[in-house]
Amino acid sequence: MFTLTPLEMEALYLSLLVSGWAVAASLPFGILCAWILARLNFPGKSLVDGLVHLPLVLPPVVVGYFLLVVLGRRGIVGSKLLEWFDITLAFTWKGAAIASAVIAFPLMVRAIRLSLESVDRGLEQAARTLGCGPLRTFFTVTLPLVAPGVLTGVILAFARSLSEFGATITFVSNIPGETRTLPIALYALTQVPGGDEAALRLCVISVAVAFAALLASEILSRRMAARLKA
């Protein structure tokens, strides 16, 4: 029987914690950003679109270093957070969640935006004609219609967060029990003699968790699609 060791349990727990918070914290902003890019035309839209998708093409280490400069204890924003609110993000699991959220954000926005662009605008206009305000129309008509796209974006962001390494280790380092997620624990084991077997076990765990997330996404997407058709 496959039994997890304390190190594996710790790395798995931290990965799920970081990924869960990364997705939960970025989801409202992802929906808002996707709606702005899908429905509004304004000067500089291409620039905003490029900035949103920039983490996809930048090396993750660059993103991690940028976060360290901005949110580190001596960073532009991080120093103020520490001075005014006694909040430290660098070298904590919260910082790992932020790094994962930044890296995964473009995938979430892209999935939701594509879903928004496929919605029949006539349904929204009909709701407005019947007296629904913009917010009520969005939450009662638009959001249910794009629910499969939102779910896809959430699962993609969650899976990407689980595999995040470069930005995380640059911004929050490798601290056991605090920031050592599955990818970082795997990297640490490859650097010590005799760690190959333990590293292989972590590989199997990572694949299993990612596959389970994708399988759950497929099942939920089909159920949502069937419910919308009904």
Image (tube, rainbow, N blue to C red):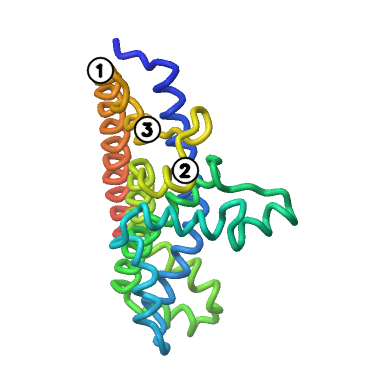
Q: Quadrant of the C terminus?
A: bottom left
Q: Residues within 10 Å of mark 3 (few under 14, many from 20)?
A: many
Q: Which structural element holds mark 2?
A: helix
User: Residue 182 — which label?
Assistant: 3
User: Residue reaching furthest top?
Assistant: 1
Q: Are discs 2 and 3 less than 8 Å apart at CB?
A: no
**Vertical placement of residue 97 versus 123, above or below:** above
Lateral position of residue 84 relative to residue 8, left or right = right
User: Residue 20 — which label?
Assistant: 2
Report the front residue among 152 and 61: 61
Q: Amino acid at mark 2?
A: Gly
Residue under label 1, please give it: 197
Of callouts 1 and 2, which one flags the residue occurring earlier in the amino acid sequence? Answer: 2
Lateral position of residue 161 relative to residue 32, left or right = left
* Front position among marks 2 and 3: 3
Report the front residue among 184 and 13: 184
Q: Position of residue 218 (x, y in %)?
A: 26, 45
- Residue at 48% across / 45% down in the picture? 96
Real-space CA distance between mark 2 and mark 3, rounded to the nearest whole angstrom: 14 Å
Query: In the picture, residue 136 is in which quadrant?
Result: bottom right
Q: Which structural element holds mark 1?
A: helix
- Residue at 32% across / 22% down in the picture? 192
Report the front residue among 184 and 5: 184
Q: Residues within 10 Å of mark 1 (few under 14, many from 20)?
A: few
Q: Residues within 10 Å of mark 2 (few under 14, many from 20)?
A: some
Of callouts 2 and 3, which one flags the residue occurring earlier in the amino acid sequence? Answer: 2
Q: Position of residue 56 (x, y in %)?
A: 31, 60
